[in-house]
Amino acid sequence: MARKSHPARDPANGGLPSKKQILDFLNSAQGKAGKREIARAFGVSGGARIALKRLLAEMAADGTLGGDKKHLREKGKLPPVAVLEVTGRDSDGDLVAKPLEWEADDGGRPVVRLRRAERGIDDSDIGIGDRVLARVTRLPRDSGGATHEATPIKKLPREKRRLLGIFRKSARGGGMIEPIDRKELKSWPILPDDVATARDGDLVRFELVRRGRFATPRAEIVESLGNPDDQRQISLIAIHAHGIPEDFPESVLEECKTLPSPTMQGRTDLRSLLLLTIDPVDARDHDDAVHAQADSDPKNSGGWVVTVAIADVAHYIRPGSKIDREAQLRGNSVYFPDRVVPMLPEKISNDLCSLRELEERPCLAVRMIFDRHGEKRSHAFVRAMMRSAAKLSYQEAQAAIDGAPSDKCLPLVDSALKPLWSAYKAVATARDKRGPLDLDLPERKIVLDDKGRVERVVTPQRLDAHRLIEEFMIQANVAAAETLEEKRLPLVYRVHDAPSAEKLKGLRDFLETLDMKVPHAGALRPEAFNKVLAQAKDLPVPDLINEVILRSQSQAEYTPKNIGHFGLNLVRYAHFTSPIRRYADLLVHRALVRALDLGPDGLTDDEIPRLASIAKAISDTERRAMAAERETTDRLIAAHLADQVGAVFPARIAGVIRSGLFVRLKDTGADGYIPISSLADDYYHHVEAAHALVGARTGAGYRLGDTVEVRLLEAIPSAGALRFEMLTPPSRANVASLKHPGGGRPRQHRQKNFGKPHKQRR
């Protein structure tokens, strides 16, 4: 029988394997490998085992080996295939990542530079905060900051939120991290060595690490974000929690210095046209301008010619450039009360592409012809050069039409503003005939003082000026989709599906308790909801009906597959009018440039097969932005109310779930929670169809939309959470006709979270 052969040992090392041989063996071993496996592999026996033990201890002491005697590994080396989290960019703007799993004893997590992904994986779909499965190779020691290089194999589901919490220091060193996520109840212990520079009460970003394979996870602070109670820092909580890229890489900023200057070649001259920008008072960028005039064509008597000019972002941002890759990763701008996280660098968004008053700017414009009934007869797109005649706010433009023009508006009333309003009147007639979903849900706006703190919360009046701009933008968006379909060029649509059968049933059940009805799904159109909304105006709580109908709707999204836009009641729709703040619009601009042969910077052959993955990615970034904006508003209002604990507020019940009531304060629109366990006067059960809690003993209860008085018991600004006490007794009038589902003694349900429904965008 042949003897089993062993790898050659190093004679100069006393017959023991060399350090390199040991490392090579460990890196190629299938499964765990410790001292016993090494001795067996190299035929080390007898007294030589003691020498091997000393050699392994020496390698551990000099930082070459990690682990324990039963599971040794090369310290600081990643496995050939690992899960990585993309954490940032290097000086060249390339993505870098860190391993998701890492032994704390190995020191700091290594930096991994990402190469181009394998076939079938879209590089542009990978951004900061994403997780990827990747093939990893170690780089030579003189390779700069990165120690490894990786090729993505697969993009993994994104972690919805980064780990953020409040550090509470212990007198013995270390401490605990209290999570800011309302749904996360667990606090994490932290050792003194893992505190970094955090101070007691700081908001921190942390990671969970294990010290040993079977040890309990502990927190390790990655970054201290300062005092969470400072209202000037509150938007940073959402930015970090959602992994929103804030600062632009140096390579992107450098590329901004070499952007091509526009010329008149191939452009229509619109500089003499009285194009106006009409925006919010505090608008940070201006990417659309409008003009209207009576159509001189005798065949279109009473008709109108409306021009919508949009900043020509595609001229500056070429496909595949560093700026383009960064914009695609961001997907959209994110707007907070105290700051904007823009999709594009300020040089572009606030300068080159902002349609500034009396300054020449390149644009992509659509000239639309409407008849006297507001029906669009034709349209045409041109690449042009424009000069904004005036920058107006919605309020300023409306005041001018209402007979109180400012000095700036006075010369524009007859020449520009009145034609716009007359054209809008015609187009609005066609809109009403079309019958889009007509929800009336004014949104709260936070006004900050000069120190960045909440001064007050207001509900801005919705003006005809708002509706005018909105309707002209919708018409321009429709024209873009129609043109690209006509040219048979793939595009990213903005779609909005009809309500799901499940949500529709819930809505129908609720409306039936109010003696109101909605048709079944087969015959469903926005007009059916509008009839309900019209009836609701005669009820005490019309805003409640608007809210419930909103919650029944699907969420709008981007996709190359057209299913129409239910809310707008349109067969085809795309986003064209905001390329400064939405990547979807930039794609539509490029598609128009290509379809109409308007220049060399149109949609590329490389982009077309990736439209589906890009559309999904930017739909995700839009939802991320919505969540971050909503959470920041909640946190700011909670901070504003933090010194009013004990105060009594008028409110309305805005949500009913098994575990309690959500209430919305009348003055600020702040949302808070009343746990069912605090309603101690009765045992309450949840009547889901009626959105009510009903007392088993008295038959009295609380229902969605009820006007109540509440007392603030607790405000947690870092979580945006408010907890209230109910002061208004339960009513029998609103719930008298409701029956207990199933009988028996209802269970009490404890408070589980502070979550609540939210609004969507078109």
Image (tube, rainbow, N blue to C red):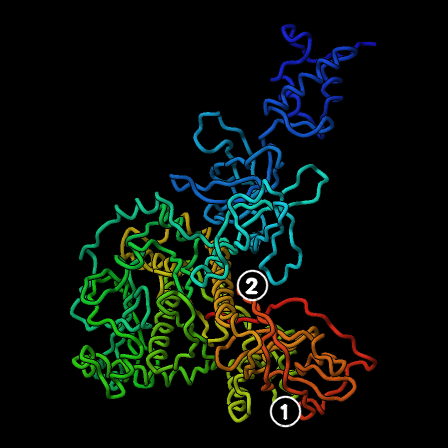
Query: At x 55% / y 37%, what residue is drawn?
Result: 109
Between 617 and 69, the residue placed more toward the observer is: 69
Q: Secondary structure at mark 1?
A: loop
Query: At x 24% / y 71%, what residue is drawn?
Result: 391
Give x and y (percent) for residue 267: 21, 60
Whether residue 613 is visible here, answered yes or no, is no
Q: Which residue is mark 2?
A: 719
Whether residue 614 is visible here, answered yes or no, is yes
To which quarter of the image does residue 270 belong? bottom left
Between 381 and 526, the residue placed more toward the observer is: 526
* Circle on res. 526: none
To which quarter of the image does residue 29 belong? top right
Q: Which residue is mark 1?
A: 515
Give x and y (percent) for residue 588: 38, 60
To which quarter of the image does residue 371 belong? bottom left
As shown in the figure, which amino acid type bears the numbered disc 2?
Answer: Ala
Q: Is residue 533 above or below residue 119?
A: below
Mark earlier in primary sequence (2, 1)? 1
Q: CA distance from mark 2 to mark 1?
A: 39 Å
Query: At x 61% / y 56%, what residue is drawn?
Result: 178
**Left or right of residue 581, residue 356 in this image:** left
> Callout 2: 10 Å neighbours few (<14), some, many (20+)?
many
